[in-house]
């Protein structure tokens, strides 16, 4: 697949076939992510692979609970738009995907957000090149319970930056229309 086709095929996927992604393929994708640039070549990103749907459901419930608590404290928060879905016990923030990959890193790394975002992009392109679908699920990063963080392997001093779901898409939607580059000035 040429690069332009890859760009067109990398869509946010939230509907997956009921089919597991082989661990070997997940590992190959993660190997590709190690090629992503990071500030000062620190390579701070670490990965947690979750394939157990029961664990994913518990993580979804934890995120939903925490987000709803945040909304109670700040009813005008931007998450307000998700309130109805978050109150629905059947809503799974991970869309029942067969695989979830948390990209995590040390809270001490000043460039962690950017490093993890670049790594996530590489992950998504690598997956798309293999016919897999992904979606960065920001709602899935709100895990605060020490016990569940320990259970999934998040070390002390680290935090979740990018929860990425992964699976075989039921369909790849066409790219939505995009605007042309908004060039402010050429000097």
Image (cartoon, rainbow, N blue to C red):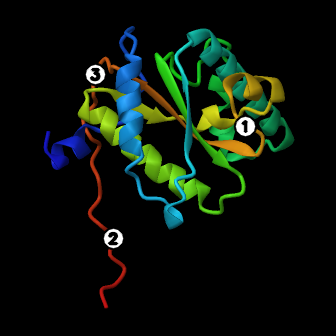
Kindly report the distance in space between the C-alpha atoms of the residues bearing marks 3 and 2. Answer: 31 Å
Mark 3 vs 2: CB contact within 8 A: no
Q: Which mark is residue 171?
A: 3
Residue placed under numbered mark 1 in the picture: 155
The first of marks 3 and 2 along the sequence is: 3
- Report the quarter where the C terminus lies: bottom left
Residue shown at 68% from the left, 38% from the top: 80
Q: Which residue is drawn at 28% across and 22% down?
A: 171
Extreme residue in the bottom direction: 187
Q: Residue at x 56, y 11 (%)?
A: 53
Closer to viewer: mark 3 or mark 2: 3
In front: 59, or 25?
Answer: 25
129 displayed left or right of 12: left
| Distance in Å between CA atoms under marks 1 and 3 | 36 Å
Write the residue at 78% across / 33% down: 144
172 horizontally vs 27: left or right: left
Q: Earlier in the sequence, mark 2 or mark 1?
A: 1
Q: Name the residue under label 2.
A: 182
- Residue 34, given in percent of the width and then of the height, sits at 42, 46
Disc 1 on helix, strand or loop? Answer: loop
Q: Are there few (<14), some (14-19), or many (20+) residues within 10 Å of tag 3?
A: few
From the top left corner, tell me how far across and down residue 23 is, in percent. Answer: 41, 19
Q: Which of 160 and 183 is in front in this view?
A: 160
Query: Of tags 2 and 1, which is closer to the observer?
Result: 1
């Amino acid at each position: 697949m040429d690069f332009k086709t890859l760009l067109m095929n990398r869509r946010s996927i939230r509907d997956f076939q009921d089919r597991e992604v082989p661990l070997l393929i997940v590992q190959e994708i993660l190997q590709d992510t190690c090629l992503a640039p990071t500030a000062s070549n620190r390579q701070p990103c670490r990965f947690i692979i979750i394939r157990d749907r029961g664990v994913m459901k518990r993580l979804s419930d934890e995120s939903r609970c925490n987000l709803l608590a945040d909304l109670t404290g700040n009813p005008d928060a931007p998450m307000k738009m998700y309130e109805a879905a978050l109150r629905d016990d059947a809503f799974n923030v991970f869309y029942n995907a067969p695989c979830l990959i948390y990209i995590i890193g040390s809270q001490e790394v000043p460039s962690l957000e950017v490093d993890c975002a670049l790594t996530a992009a590489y992950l998504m392109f690598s997956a798309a090149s293999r016919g897999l679908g992904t979606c960065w699920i920001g709602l899935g990063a709100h895990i605060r319970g020490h016990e569940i963080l320990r259970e999934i392997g998040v070390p002390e001093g680290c935090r979740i930056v990018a929860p990425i779901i992964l699976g075989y898409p039921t369909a790849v939607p066409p790219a939505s229309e995009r605007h042309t580059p908004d060039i402010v000035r050429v000097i």
